[in-house]
Structures are given as structure tokens and as C-alpha cells.
Amino acid sequence: MSARRDRTGLAAIAPFLWLGVFFLFPFLLVAKLSLSDTALAMPPYAPRIDWALGMAGLRAFLAALDLQTYGRLTSDHLYVAAYLSSLRFAAVATAILLLLGYPMAYAMARCSPAVRQALLMAVILPFWTSFLIRVYALIGILKPEGLLNAVLAAVGLGPVALLNTDAAIYIGLVYAYLPFMVLPLYAVLERQHHDLLEAAADLGCTPLQAFWRVTFPLSLPGVGAGALLCFIPMVGEFVIPDLLGGSGTLMLGKTIWTEFFANRDWPAASAVAIALLATLVVPIALYQRQQAKLIGGAR
Amino acid sequence: MRRGLTAFNRVSLLFGFGFLYLPIFLLVVYSFNASQLVTVWGGFSTRWYASLFRNEQLLDAVWVTFRVGLISATVATILGTFAAVALVRAGRFKGRTLFSGLVYAPLVMPEVVLGLSLLLLFVAFGLPRGFWTVVIGHATVTLCYATVVIQARLAAFDRQLEEAARDLGCPPFKAFFLVTLPNIAPAVAAAWMLAFTLSLDDLVIASFTSGPGATTLPMRIYSQVRLGVNPEINAVSTLLIGLVATGVIAAYLMQLRRRQDA
């Protein structure tokens, strides 16, 4: 084989260029803008690189960058609150998703193969259905005169104001991300051999003990994957807090949107975006390490 | 892992799937509601579908969305196929680490950040925002999803088949098109469908990169939803859900049949 020159790497050129121009470079622009001075006017924002001056121009550019915008973010309690509440929403919703998704994935894994296939399809289908439409569908249930309140009234419970509250955001997050939690859990649970549980029973384990000492520890990679797969996008979520939450809801995704579209404070929006990414670096790295381990283990 | 279902298992399945499907079911049912009030059932009617087809703005948005989806999914699939080939086949090449980082990063990057960064790019270069900037935005994000889908299939494909073709004198490019591509075609088709659906759904990136005259359907739906629930939105949502569900289920059944044939 080595006699033939391998030119397969050339296939990378087109996608490489595309991602360089439309992903990497714009990202650097965000980073640069977050270090630029706030101006109420439209861009370009100072400082700019003066290429005519060569290295001196570059040095002047770097010297003019400052952390002023970040300073503004940390001193303004609204930004700090948005940051903390994003993390709280994502963490609590991830916990609820685990509690709801685990029993579901577990039950799916115990079905007959034909039923399992159908249920798997049923979990994947909402993933293909428009996110926006699914959130919209939820509004129909949560609004004051919606189904939930009709059911509550029927059993004699008073009307509850759900829409535009934090509870609605939790319901929305859990609803939208449930497939992301169930799929990785199902993938690990489905592979587990029933013999393991029989062996545990033979050794005197009750079914509940067998679950906690065999099934659950073995499913931990799925738990980790599901939790990260939900947590990461939820921190930056925009549509759900915007449509289901109240006007006072603070989440980073919404903050970026508002800074950008309503306040037209582009440096602030960029700095919030960088802060959001910096927060997500650790969970993303964890997730990728775990995926690499899973793939390595399967081979 | 297999054994009979306990009562607890049944309840979890019922609750979980009920939760996933009940809102969509109600949305579809109320799209056939004769009453203007979205919560009162006024009898069966298709009036909202009729008014849908007279709503120029909405039809316009549908047309824009489909064109954006078709073009961006095609670009994404072609670039994604190249990227997958490079990642699976090329072994080590210069910049491989950076390249795979670039391919995977948009998958986990919040949409709001992607949208913002693309918009800054278009502003920096003075590109007027509109139809083509949305296409670029969607192609960039969905390219990464397409790569992952095609990569999985390519990794499982037996490379010896292609090598056999080359031993028989086939030039590498031709061997790829005659042997490898037909074999990974289902994944390429799936990647295209995924890219198209993602483009069809996207609100955030479209909102950042779009300009006057290029309002997509999700943008139109979003601005209406903010004003309140409206039966016409139920009708257009029902049509979209029906379209996507038909496509996904058909693809799934085809895949099942192929597996049984094999």
C-alpha cells in the first residue's frame, strides 16, 4: 500500500476552508469584540488593526484591547444573576431528566426486540420534529386556560399560573431534552446481559439490590453521557426561557439575544458569549473524553 | 437485558411517552378546531388550513425556508462527505487535530453564540444580510452533523473493497465513486435529511443571519407565537410535523427492509 501516495488528506481542504472562514474566524471576531470598547454606534469598534504599520500596528492593536466589558459584566448584578440562574436551571433540569429518563430507558430495554424498535423510533421522532413547534405545543397546555388547568379544575384543584414562571421553564427543558437523555441511557442498558442479574440473584441479591449493585453502576457511562448531552445545550438555551419563562427570566442565551437585538450592545453580547463558552469548556471536554473512551472500549 | 415488564416499568413508559406525545397530539387536534378560541372545541373544521393558503406572508416564509434547506443541506452534505473521508481515511495529516476540533465544536456550541459570531463576520465584511447569509449559516452548522453521520458509516465500511478496485486498475477517485460512495449512500442520504430538517427547524441562527426579505418559517412562527396562541400556527405546525414524521418513518421502514433482505 505504501507504494501508492496517500492523498486522501486533500479531501479535508474544502471543509477545512469553509469552517475556517465561517466558524473559526467569526469566533475570533467575537473574542476581539468582547475586548473592545463599548460604543453605542454600529461597528467597526475600536481598536482596529492598522496593517499599514505592520508589526507596530499589531502591537498597538493588542495594547488597545482591554477587559473593560468583562469588568462591566462582573460588576452588574444582572449578568451575574443570569449566569448563576442558567447554571441552576440546567443542573436542576438535568437531575429531573435523569429521574424521568432512567426508568423510561430501563423499561424500554426490557421490552421484546420488536417493541423495543418501535419505542426507539418513538423516542427519536420528536428529535426530528421542530423544537420551536414542540415548545409552542407546550404553551397550549401550560397557559391559564390550557389543558393542565382544566385537568386540575376537574379534580378540584384551583387554577395554577404556570406559563411565564420558572416551573414552566423546567417543564419545557425536560420536555424538549427528554430524548437526549433517554437515548444514551437506553444504549447502555440495552447492551447489559440478563445473566448478570441472574448471577446476582443466585448470589442472594434481591432485585432491588441487584439493580443498585449491578445494573446502575454498569449504566454510569450512559448516565454521564445523557447528563452532559442535556446540560451543555441547556445552559445556553434561548427559545424555552424566552417563550415559556416570564419577562424577568434570566438566562445567558436570552441575555445575549437581548443585549444584541434590543440593547444593541454588541461588545456586551460578545463578552457574555465568551463567558458562556468558558463555562461550557469543562463539561464539553468531559463529554468528549467519555465519548472517546466509549468508542475505544467498543473496539 | 430482557424480562417481563413490572407495573413500575409500564407506568414509566406510559408517563414518559405520554409526556412526549400529548402536547403534539393536542396541537394537531386543535388545528382542526372550528373555534377561534384555542381552548374551546367548536367542532371539526379545516378553515385554518384554508386561511393558511391565503396567508401570503406565511407562504412566502415556507418558500424561503425550503430553498434555504435544499441549498444548505446539499452544501453541507457534500462538504460533510469530504470531511468524513478525511477524518476516517487520511490517517495523520497536517492540521488534523485542528480540523477535527473545527468539525466537532459547532455541535456543542450554543446556537446563540454561533449566530452572533456569523453575524459579526457578515458585518465585518459588509455583506448584506439576507437569503444567502442564512444559507451559509445553516450549511456551516449542519455540515458538522452530516460529517458525524457519514463518518460512522464510513468507519464501518470495509476498505478492502475499494483497495480491490484499485488493485484492478481503478484510479482512486473512480474507485471512491464506484465502490465506496454507493456503499455509504444510505448514510449520505440520512445526513442530507438531517441537515435539511435542522435547517427547517432553526430559529436562532436564522434570526441572527437573516435580513429583510428573507424571513424563514420558524422566524414567522416565533413572532406570531410571541403574540399568543393562534390556530393558524397549529395548522402550519401540523403540516410540518406530518411531513417530517412521514419522511422519518419511511426512511426507517426502508432501512428495516434492507436489513431483512441482507
Image (tube, coloured by chain):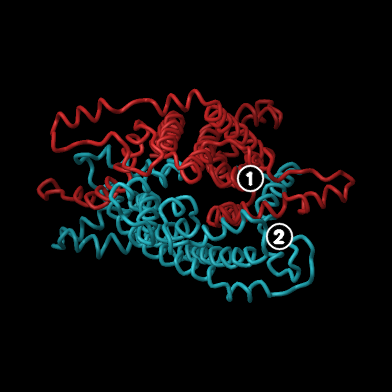
Where does residue B131 sit, x and y in percent of width and height?
38, 62
Using residue A173 as the reference point, say whether residue B81 is left or right of it: left
Using residue A8 as the reference point, say whether residue B117 is left or right of it: right
Q: Residue furthest left?
A: A3
Where does residue B197 sit, x and y in percent of width and height?
47, 59
Tell me what hue chain A is rendered in: red
Where does residue B55 sit, x and y in percent of width and height?
57, 72
Given residues B138 and B82, the one toward you in this image is B138
Residue under mark 2: which chain is it in?
Answer: B
Q: Examine the image and state in which quarter residue A84 appears.
A: top right
Q: Residue at x 48, y 50 (%)?
A: B204
Depicted B74 relative to depicted A22: above or below = below
The residue indicated by pointer 2 is B26
Q: Examine the image and state in which quarter residue A24 appears.
A: top left
Residue under mark 1: which chain is it in?
Answer: A
Q: Which chain is cyan?
A: B
Q: Residue at x 65, y 51 (%)?
A: B20
Using residue B45 as the reference point, say whether residue B115 is left or right of it: left
